[in-house]
Amino acid sequence: PNPDALQEFSVLSNSFSAEYGRGSGSIVSAVTKNGTNQIHGTIYEFLRNDALDARSFFGHAGLVDKPRLRRNQFGASVGGPLIRDRTFWFASWESLRENRAVTQTGLIVPTPLERAGDFSATARKPTDPLTRQPFPNNAIPITRQSQAARKMADILIPLPNFGASQFVYNSPSTERRDQLLARGERKFSANDRLNVSFFFANLDQTQNFNVPLANGQGSWTNKRILANYTKVVTPALV
């Protein structure tokens, strides 16, 4: 849950009790807020924008523009009584909208000579898979090259723009997150209490695969309904 929906949390690193099953490593336990006899709420937005950022070294070198950054994280929470001292409700919502780019500097691409099949200036020379010998003049004959592969390389793989074989570019990505939490509590008596909560989270993102024209998209959705009834039988038994 988002921070405005949390009442408290704890991190357990060892010696777990039986209620946490057979989990290993560490466990984060979170308790969400609930309504009270008074209506309380919050509303917020966190903003990040590239207009407030400095240019990178490669931007100053004229290789790329300043990486784009548009990040808006906003939400609200509200809770209160349905029946005073008996029934309470609470709801929290948060969304994230991010459109950004990161300057990538580690992409090594073929040089113009290598794209044409000429590896005479390359440290590691290719060998003919049929004869296991180097190609004449360390150049792959045009008749041995796949024209379809060359066309795909021309479309997907850019020419170097920094050094002999390095390509510097801004890698784009987008992210869209939505989260909703709704919770209700009913106090039947001092010893009987019922809690019901609903949680929904959704993520849609697009990321670059370290090749300028190769992007991937992923989605993830989580829905959870939880009901908990607590009865105090004796001071030592719940």
Image (cartoon, grey):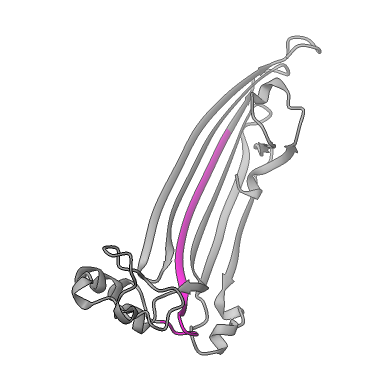
Position of the C terminus by quadrant:
top right
Q: Residue placed at 47% from the left, 84% from the top? A: 164
Q: Residue placed at 26% from the left, 63% from the top? A: 130
In the rendered image, residue 176 lying in the magenta stretch gets the answer yes
Which one is in front, 128 or 59?
Answer: 128
The count of marks equals 0
Judge from the rendering whether residue 95 lies leftward or rightward of residue 32; answer left or right. left
Give the x, y percent position of residue 204: 43, 53
In the rendered image, residue 226 lying in the magenta stretch gets the answer no
Q: Magenta residues, as a range?
A: 160-183
Q: Residue placed at 30% from the left, 63% from the top? A: 129
Q: Eyeballing the image, is 233 above or below 132?
A: above
Position of the N terminus by quadrant:
top right
Quadrant in the picture for residue 88: top right
Give the x, y percent position of residue 63: 49, 86
Which one is in front, 27 or 189?
Answer: 27
Judge from the rendering whether residue 173 lies leftward or rightward of residue 144; answer left or right. right
Q: Eyeballing the image, is 4 above or below 129?
A: above
Give the x, y percent position of residue 46: 61, 64
Quadrant in the picture for residue 157: bottom left
Q: Residue placed at 59% from the left, 81% from the top? A: 56
Which one is in front, 84 or 202?
Answer: 202
| SS assignment for the magenta stretch, majority | strand
Q: Eyeballing the image, is 89 above or below 114?
A: above
Give the x, y percent position of residue 12: 74, 35
The furthest residue to the right: 235
